[in-house]
Image: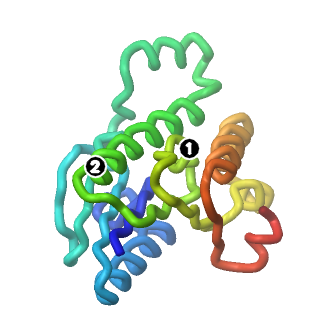
């Protein structure tokens, strides 16, 4: 099978070496060892196609170390709104950028299925003609209740909103535990 794994974090990026990045890495390696054709599509500081530990990775220029690569109009709108909608704008921007790459790769050689991470709603703009699933890593609401992310509540609510909308747009959802499934 040809499988796409879309994630906002992967181990190739110096800022992301946590649970989600390592899960996607392990899943990709396992799928490759089982004989599947796997592509990881991830947010990055620059756009390039690399191979990491045998895994083909499409790095998509969504952000760099200093600032998200967004048009000046988005920055102006965000500044006028006092950065209240920063999380939702970044998430939508990221989803659109990653989905464009998924569509391009699908035209080159069709995917049988694409798995999106739930984090930041990266599957929000997912192509409708490709079967998709979303893997839940955690619950944004639960993480916030148990200590939070250290960000404003309005941004947490925005993240919850876009993640929920992405979940409603997918063909299937699965999670690592019964607790996460029950919360959803």
User: In the image shown, does 82 or 182 lie closer to the viewer?
Assistant: 182
Q: Is residue 177 left or right of residue 14?
A: right
Residue in view at x 81 percent, y 65 percent: 183
Residue at the image point whose x is 26% and y is 62% from the top: 57
Decide which of 172, 22 is in the foreground and name it.
172
- Circle 2 Cα neighbour tier, 10 Å, few/some/many (<14 / 14–19 / ≥20): few
Q: Is residue 103 above or below residue 4?
A: above
Horizontal side, residue 106 vs residue 183: left or right: left
Q: Is residue 146 visible?
A: yes
Asked whether, in this view, residue 183 is left or right of residue 49, the answer is right
> Would you identify the image quadrant in which residue 114 lies?
bottom left
Q: Report x, y in % for residue 67.
A: 37, 33
Query: What's the CA distance linking mark 1 and mark 2?
Result: 20 Å
Circle 1 packing at 10 Å, graded few (<14), some (14-19), many (20+), is many
Element type at mark 1: loop
Name the front one of labels 1 and 2.
2
Q: Quadrant of residue 30?
A: bottom left
Q: Which residue is mark 2?
A: 107
Quadrant of the image containing the N terminus: bottom left
Residue extending furthest bottom? 34
The numbered disc on residue 148 is: none
Q: Position of residue 94 (x, y in %)?
A: 44, 40
**Which residue is at the front of the view, 143 or 104?**
104
- First in sequence: mark 1 vs mark 2: 2
Tell me whether the residue at label 1 lies in contact with that at label 2, contact meaning CB atoms closer than 8 angstroms: no
The answer to whether any part of residue 63 appears in the image is no
Q: Which mark is residue 124?
A: 1
């Amino acid at each position: 099978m040809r499988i796409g794994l879309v994630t906002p974090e992967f181990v190739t990026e110096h800022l992301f070496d946590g649970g989600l990045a390592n899960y996607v890495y392990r899943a990709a390696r396992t799928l490759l060892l089982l004989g599947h054709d796997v592509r990881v599509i991830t947010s990055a500081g620059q756009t390039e196609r690399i191979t990491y530990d045998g895994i083909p990775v499409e790095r998509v220029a969504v952000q760099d170390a200093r600032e998200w690569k967004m048009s000046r109009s988005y920055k102006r709108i965000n500044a006028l709104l006092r950065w209240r909608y920063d999380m939702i704008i970044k998430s939508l921007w990221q989803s659109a950028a990653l989905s464009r790459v998924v569509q391009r790769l699908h035209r080159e050689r069709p995917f049988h299925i694409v798995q999106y991470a739930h984090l930041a709603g990266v599957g929000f703009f997912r192509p409708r003609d490709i079967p998709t699933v979303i893997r839940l890593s955690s619950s944004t609401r639960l993480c916030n209740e148990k200590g939070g992310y250290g960000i404003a509540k309005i941004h947490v609510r925005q993240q919850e909103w876009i993640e929920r909308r992405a979940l409603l747009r997918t063909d299937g959802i699965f999670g690592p535990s019964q607790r996460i499934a029950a919360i959803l």
